[in-house]
Every structure is written in C-alpha cells, then in structure tokens.
Image (spheres, rainbow, N blue to C red):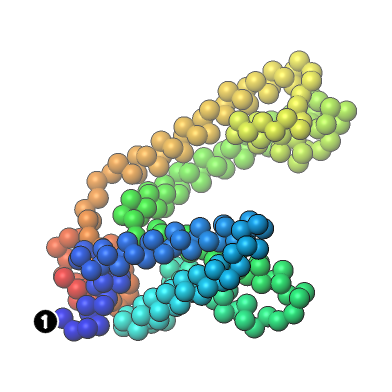
C-alpha cells in the first residue's frame, strides 16, 4: 500500500499511471497557454485593451506553477537535489519574475519589469519533461556531442581559411575590409543564408564563393546523419520511473532499484 507521498511522486514526476498522464497533459496545456499569453502581451494593442485580463491570467498561472514547484520540493526525499537540478532551476525561473515585479516600484522600473517578465518564456523548456520523443532526441544529441564538436571545429577551420583567402583576393575595395568580416561572409555563404551585404566581384572570388556554396550542402547533411544514427539506436527504456532519492529517470522497465543510487523506486 503506497502512502500519499509516494502516490503524489508517481503522479507529479512520472506518467505511467492514468493520474500521472492527466497531470502531465494538464500542465502541458497550462504551459502552452502561459507562453501564448507572453506572446500576446508583447502586442501593444492587445496589451492595452486586455490589461486586466492578462494580469489576472498571469497570476493564476503563476499560482499553479508555484503550487507545482512546492509540491515537487515536498515529495522528493532530497529537496535540494531537485532545487539545483536543471528542471528545478527552470521551474523557479518560470514563477519568480511575477513576484519580483511586486518589489520593483516606480515608472523607470517598468522596463526592468518587462525584461523580468520575459523570463516566463523559460516555461517552454518545461515541455521537454513530458515528451518521450524529446528525451530520445536530447539523448541522441548528447551522445553525438563528440562527433558534432569535431565537425564544428572542422567548419571553423574551413571558414577561417576561405575568409582569409577572400580578404586577400577581394580586398577592402569590395567590402572585405578585414579578416573577421571576411570570415563572417564565409559563414553566411557556407550556411546558405546569403544576406548579400558582402559579395565577391572578381572572377577568382566568385569561383571560391561557388566552392563554398557547394560545400554548404554538407553543413546540414553531416550533423543530421550523425544525430540520426544515434536516434535509431535501440533503447530499452519505455517507462517514466523517477527515483525519489536522486531523481534519476533512465531505468529499465523491470527495474526495482535505482541503478544510480540503489534506492527502491516506485513500481
């Protein structure tokens, strides 16, 4: 027979039960509404005509997230581990700007309040907690970090070489006023963005630019292939069990004890 604390832990931190799934879906909807309100509040006409409604909605949402934050701290065995975890910091950032706005008084502080309230956009990061696909993607990115880092380092070498060559070929009279500015051109061209603020005019420069453009297709293909290879690797975890002691959440389906700290997990 589970006690209330274990039952709440299963609902709030996990999603294997009907109550847990309902809690996650409800919280996800509140997060989306909150982010939508932040966006609408940035529109002057909507902000002026619906000032009271937006303010009331913000306090309601802040109260919901505050209650959620307090419950998460109360039901874990080691509160400080959660408070200083990534999601703990995100949860705190999602509620603290509203309370800070009460402490800042004066007309000159209105700009500061607006900046603080923009931190509410951090609530969108809470969405990653509730999607298994997001966790798989995050794990694939993390496992690919070494290969992707080498690729990025290689790209930096390429743009430095081509930027320097273009500085020597085109010169200041064609807009390539320095090596850093030429490297900026190489990055813009290699990534196929092509702002057009700087462009080569000499035949040699245009030939080099063509080579950089063709190489630009590999910018997307190579890292995409690296990450995709990690995504398609088999995974043996299909549950959302979270250890109440250390908050580790990558347990096998048949796990009874936490593989990180050895504590018994809810099953």
Can residue 84 be seen by looking at this rendering? no
Q: Secondary structure at mark 1?
A: loop
Residue at 22% from the left image edge and 77% from the top image edge: 7
Counting from the top left corner in percent of width and height, residue 197 is at 76, 33
**Frontmost residue, 172 versus 192:** 192
Residue 127 in percent (x, y) is at 41, 59
Tell me: 172 left or right of 186: right
Q: Is residue 113 above or below residue 228?
A: below
Question: Of all residues shown, which one is farthest toward the front?
Answer: 49
Residue 213 in sight: yes
The picture places residue 188, in percent across and down from the top left corner, at 66, 35
Q: Are there few (<14), some (14-19), or many (20+) residues within 10 Å of tag 1? A: few
Q: Residue furthest left?
A: 1
Comparing 258 with 241, the one in front is 241
| Residue located 22% across and 83% down the image | 4
Q: Quadrant of the C terminus?
A: bottom left
Residue at the spot 69% in from the left edge and 22% down from the top edge: 208
Dividing the picture into quadrants, the one containing residue 265 is: bottom left
The residue at which mark 1 appears reads as: 1
Residue 235 position (above or below residue 20): above
In the image, what residue occupies the spot 51% across and 30% down? 218
Residue 253 rendering spot, x and y as whole percentages: 17, 60
Q: Quadrant of the N terminus?
A: bottom left
């Amino acid at each position: 027979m589970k006690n209330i604390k274990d039952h709440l832990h299963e609902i709030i931190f996990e999603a294997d039960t009907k109550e847990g799934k309902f809690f996650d879906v409800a919280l996800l909807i509140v997060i989306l509404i909150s982010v939508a309100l932040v966006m609408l509040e940035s529109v002057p006409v909507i902000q002026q005509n619906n000032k009271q409604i937006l303010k009331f909605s913000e306090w309601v949402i802040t109260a919901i997230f505050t209650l959620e934050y307090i419950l998460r701290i109360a039901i874990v065995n080691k509160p400080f581990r959660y408070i200083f975890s990534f999601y703990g910091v995100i949860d705190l950032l999602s509620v603290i700007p509203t309370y800070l706005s009460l402490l800042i008084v004066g007309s000159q502080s209105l700009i500061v309040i607006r900046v603080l309230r923009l931190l509410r956009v951090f609530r969108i990061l809470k969405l990653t907690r509730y999607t298994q696909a997001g966790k798989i993607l995050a794990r694939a990115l993390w496992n690919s970090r070494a290969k992707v880092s080498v690729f990025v380092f290689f790209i930096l070498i390429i743009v430095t070489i081509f930027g320097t060559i273009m500085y020597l070929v085109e010169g200041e009279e064609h807009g390539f006023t320095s090596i850093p500015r030429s490297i900026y051109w190489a990055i813009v061209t290699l990534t196929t963005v092509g702002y057009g603020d700087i462009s080569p005019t000499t035949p040699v420069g245009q030939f080099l630019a063509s080579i950089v453009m063709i190489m630009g297709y590999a910018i997307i293909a190579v890292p995409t292939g690296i990450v995709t290879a990690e995504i398609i690797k088999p995974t043996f975890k299909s549950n959302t069990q979270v250890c109440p002691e250390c908050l580790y959440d990558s347990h096998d389906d048949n796990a009874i004890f936490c593989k990180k700290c050895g504590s018994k997990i809810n099953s």
